[in-house]
Image (spheres, helix red, strand yellow):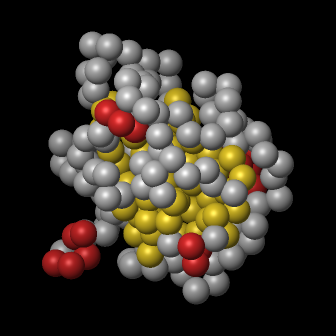
Amino acid sequence: MALTGDDATLVSRRPPAATPPLGTDRGDGTWAWNSIILSWVAGFALQSSAFDHGGPIPRRHGCEGEDLSPPLSWSGPPESTRSLALVVDDPDAPAGTFTHWLAWALDPGAEGLGVGEAAPVEGRNDFGTSGYRGPCPPPGHGRHRYSFRLYALDSDPALPPGAGKGELERVVEGRTLAVAELIGTYER
């Protein structure tokens, strides 16, 4: 999807040319990602006041700092959105995509989460804990991308706290109205 002018500020656009895309462009306005078809809706955006799309995530939000989740704000979810779900992962991890945060039951009207603020319901990350765990790539492994994907859903996911990524993916499949994405980078 090509965006121009004011649309170029949307974080639901493709990452900068220096960053390989995290999904497959199907050519019809949707992207394939981890078996879920993502629907990019103009106006649905996810951003952070801590870092720009494609820019470095401050150390404060990683394992070398306070390990606090960055502030996130969203805007423009489709009108029929009833709930939001968030997945944060590192597709550049040495053993494959590594999940840092799973969250759901986010109120679309809340318009964001503050620094270190927990989501209403959080799942089990690949560290084996619930909640946010920040970027922590192996030293010397180079720059890693961190994808923050926000799913606009037509219903609230019926998942218990501590559910895993596979469980969340199964629940959001078929209920996703739109997805906004924010990419940050981190290197040690």
Whether residue 82 is visible, yes or no, is yes
Quadrant location, the N terminus: bottom left
Q: Quadrant of the C terminus?
A: top left
Q: Is residue 173 above or below residue 61?
A: below
Identity of the residue drawn at 43% across and 33% down: 66
What number of labels is visible? 0
Query: Image point 64% across, 70% down: which residue?
Result: 107
Q: Quadrant of residue 65?
A: top left
Residue 94 in the image: x percent, y percent? 43, 18
Residue drawn at (24%, 69%), measured in percent from left and top?
9
User: Is residue 133 shown left or right of residue 59?
Assistant: right
Residue 177 appears anywhere in the view: no
Residue 46, x across and y down, in percent: 41, 64
Q: Position of residue 155 (x, y in %)?
A: 74, 71
Q: Residue at x 37, y 61 (%)?
A: 47
The x, y position of residue 175, in whole percent, is 69, 67
Q: Nearer the viewer, residue 188 or 38?
A: 188
Residue 90 drawn above or below residue 44 = above
**For residue 25, what is the image quadrant?**
bottom left
Q: Is 144 placed left or right of 159 in the picture? A: left
Of residues 129 and 12, the one nearer the viewer is 129
**Apparent side of residue 90 relative to residue 107 in the rendered image (left or right):** left
